[in-house]
Image (tube, rainbow, N blue to C red):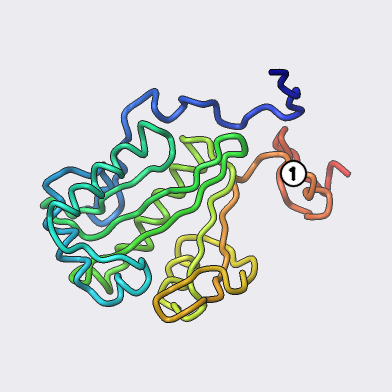
């Protein structure tokens, strides 16, 4: 079979994530993002009893065995380079939430970020700090170019998290996700890696080109 030659080199090579162990990411305020462990199953089941988590994540966990199966899938995602999933824990290793990168496209360095916060951890900025930490890592050390964040337009709490984590709202995707109560319009937010070349740079004064120069001064 003949393969048509590509005109663009992959931004991230296959194997670039799986070649090393999934990192733990410290977060200000004595929080830690670490890979999931089987012992987290009980905390997952407890968190998923919350109606808000069920509403926005479209699932429930009925047993620790089921939760351990999820955790196994989350662990496998890193090895298969299909996702990156972190447990958010405090200084005592108590489960506070989850942040995940999914829909990975290594060719273009793209991913989608999702998250939930356990009811007992809300109101302290845990989620926004964790989302910002994962995004900073993804756009920095990991080499991703664009991270997208989507949420229902009827979920203002998630919109606040996106803004606090530095995401820019780009628009609305109509009837984009089916929830238990029907189709929801979804806000689309994104963060893009800075300091890389863009064909849009010439129209955006102040945007850095690949060589670090300013688009306006380079015109």
- Can you give x and y, in whole percent of width and height, for residue 76 in the image? 31, 37
Task: Say left or right for 165 vs 56.
Answer: right
Q: Residue furthest right?
A: 219
Which quadrant is home to the C terminus? top right
Which residue corresponds to mark 1? 198
Residue under the point 51% across and 47% down: 111
| 128 or 170: nearer the viewer | 170
- Count up the numbered dots: 1
Which quadrant is home to the N terminus? top right
The secondary structure type at the circle numbered 1 is loop
Figure check: 26 above or below 90: above
Task: Say left or right for 108 vs 73.
Answer: right
- Can you give x and y, in whole percent of width and height, for residue 143 in the image? 53, 35
Task: Say left or right for 6 vs 47.
Answer: right
- Can you give x and y, in whole percent of width and height, for residue 24 in the image? 29, 39
The answer to which quarter of the image holds residue 204 is bottom right
| 209 or 75: nearer the viewer | 75
Residue under the point 38% across and 63% down: 128
């Amino acid at each position: 079979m003949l393969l048509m030659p590509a005109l663009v080199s992959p931004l991230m090579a296959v194997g670039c994530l799986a070649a090393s162990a999934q990192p733990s990411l410290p977060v200000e305020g004595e929080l830690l993002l670490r890979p999931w462990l089987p012992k987290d199953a009980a905390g997952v089941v407890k968190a998923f009893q919350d109606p808000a988590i069920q509403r926005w994540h479209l699932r429930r966990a009925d047993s620790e065995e089921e939760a351990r199966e999820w955790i196994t899938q989350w662990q496998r995602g890193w090895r298969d380079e299909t996702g990156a999933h972190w447990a958010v824990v405090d200084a005592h290793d108590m489960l506070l939430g989850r942040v995940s990168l999914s829909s990975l496209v290594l060719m273009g360095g793209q991913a989608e970020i999702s998250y939930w916060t356990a009811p007992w951890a809300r109101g302290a900025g845990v989620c926004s700090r964790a989302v910002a930490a994962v995004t900073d890592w993804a756009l920095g050390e990991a080499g991703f170019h664009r991270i997208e964040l989507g949420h229902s337009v009827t979920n203002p709490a998630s919109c606040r998290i996106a803004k606090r984590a530095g995401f820019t709202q780009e628009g609305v995707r109509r009837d984009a996700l089916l929830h238990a109560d029907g189709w929801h319009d979804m806000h689309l937010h994104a963060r893009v890696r800075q300091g890389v070349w863009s064909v849009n740079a010439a129209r955006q004064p102040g945007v850095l080109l690949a060589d670090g120069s300013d688009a306006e001064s380079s015109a």
